[in-house]
Amino acid sequence: MPISIKPQRSTPRQPGDIRFNCPVASRCGGCQLTHLCYREQLELKQRRVEALLGEFCPVEPIRGMDKPLHYRNKVHAVLAVDKRGTPISGVYAAGTHRVVPVKRCLIEDPRAGRIIQTIVSMLPKFKLRVYNEYTHRGFLRHVLIRTGHATGQIMVVLVATSLEFPGKKAFVAELLAAHPEITTVVLNLNQRETSMVLGKKETVLYGDGYMEDELCGKRFRISPQSFYQVNARQCELLYRTAIDLAGLTGRETLLDAYCGTGTIGLCASDRISQLIGVELNRDAVRDAKENARRNGVTNAVFHCDDAGRFMVRMAQEGHVPDVVMMDPPRAGSDEPFLRSLLTLKPPRVVYVSCNPETLARDVEYLVSGGYRAEVAIPVDMFPCTDHVETVALLSKIKRTTYHIDIDLDMTELDVTKAETKATHEEIKAYVLEHTGLKVSYLYIAQVKAKHGIIERDCYNKPKTEGNRVPKCPPEKEKAIEDALRHFRMIPYSIKS
């Protein structure tokens, strides 16, 4: 049965009008929201994030996709046979190991679907038996396709029970004749009786054994085992959002915890002084170092270590980074990691989360430990599914050791509501601490006026008639704006 997209109107006026009509949605289980038009999906995810994080900080409107279709650059097909013994490909039905045949999918790269169908059709000719997970006999188990959003490169991974592949040259030659866009073919060995797709051993049948793609102007090497965001288009938006929230000026040291192959940290490397990446997976650290080398990034170092223990050592040595960027798995961070983060006390924490429930739990822990949640921004990485990514910014609250009691008659002060949130001295102190820049009352007043915060006349006018008023330099203007956002005097604004 063909898959079609049924518009809500005869011609959708915007992406939110798109409705999805997938004939296998009820059996597949991969997509949970195809019964909703895209606007309704975004509204549902927005309400979910607001319900979980609204008590801690403002939640900005969710960043959706212009074209919420065929976004997955990683496609995994399970192989099986039907009642007639004919090879088929598809996905496991939700909660089972029963294969639902799928020839085309609304959210997967259509190039991958065509290649998979070609491979399935070639199996009888080359006498390649499909693996039976009950008898544990057969050769080919899965097909994994990865596609490059920016480069167009395509990697095909054949997951088999043996690296002995009779007729492999002829098989690959026929596959490439049908799909010359393929850039590499890898044979992966998986003999385990498990639901894990890939095994640890592999051999290259064609090409380099890896592919490359680009994110935020950086080029990354992707192997069959590498983690890489499955929606590269939205991943760039996600990373830009996180990097913008970090308030980088070029002077900072950024610690990228859970750094993986270094993607988000390397994307930020042009806007910081030093990048420190920490990752427990040794292969990922190796790939991160190679990605840094290939992109000419010289201000990055990567460590194979537990991020929590690494942060404790940094704190003991007095090396506190300006920003910690963290992108944990769906389970969120564990308590030892969060305790280590509180021990390190970085001024800013940018938390990239793929699970708003665990994000809310971890934000509550950090808030109780002396941090303030500034803002949360949902990003829709996975249309048609109930998953939603969220980026949250947290700032360390400064504890004062003394205070002075004074009496003020507020009727004598001409201040706006926003102006009462922070004094000029507090704004100057924040800018100096976070950027090393010294700013004047005049510059603060100019930036506040730009954002509609009215100042008293004495801040904006020259001391003598006819004197020229100096304008705030762009670098100091940005630093003052960051301070105003910190004190919630102006809203966060993220470049899309």
Image: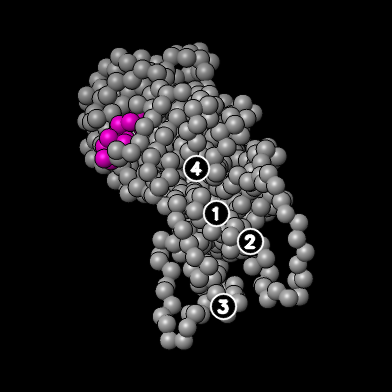
Labels 3 and 4 touching (C-beta < 8 A):
no
Q: Nearer the viewer, residue 314 or 156?
A: 314
Return the mark for residue 422: 2
Q: Which residue is mark 1?
A: 430
Range of the magenta residues?
287-296
What type is the residue that disc 3 sits on? Cys
| Pointer 3 local density, CA inside 10 Å: few below 14, some 14–19, many at least 20 | few
User: Marks 3/2: CA distance?
Assistant: 18 Å
Q: Quick one: label 2 or label 4, which is nearer the N terminus?
A: 4
Estimate the x, y position of residue 104 in percent, counting from the top left: 45, 44
Q: Which residue is mark 4?
A: 323
What is the crowding at mark 4: few (fewer than 14 residues within 10 Å), some, or many (at least 20)? many
> Looking at the picture, how far across and down is residue 331, in whole percent?
61, 32
Of the two numbered discs 3 and 2 in the rendering, the one whose residue sits closer to the viewer: 3
Which amino acid, by three-letter code, is at mark 1? Tyr
Q: Residue at x 60, y 44 (%)?
A: 396
Camera sees residue 120? no
Residue 111 belongs to magenta span: no
Give me the C-alpha separation between circle 4 and circle 1.
15 Å
Considering the numbered disc 3 on the image, is that residue within a helix, a strand or a loop? helix
Residue under pointer 3: 458
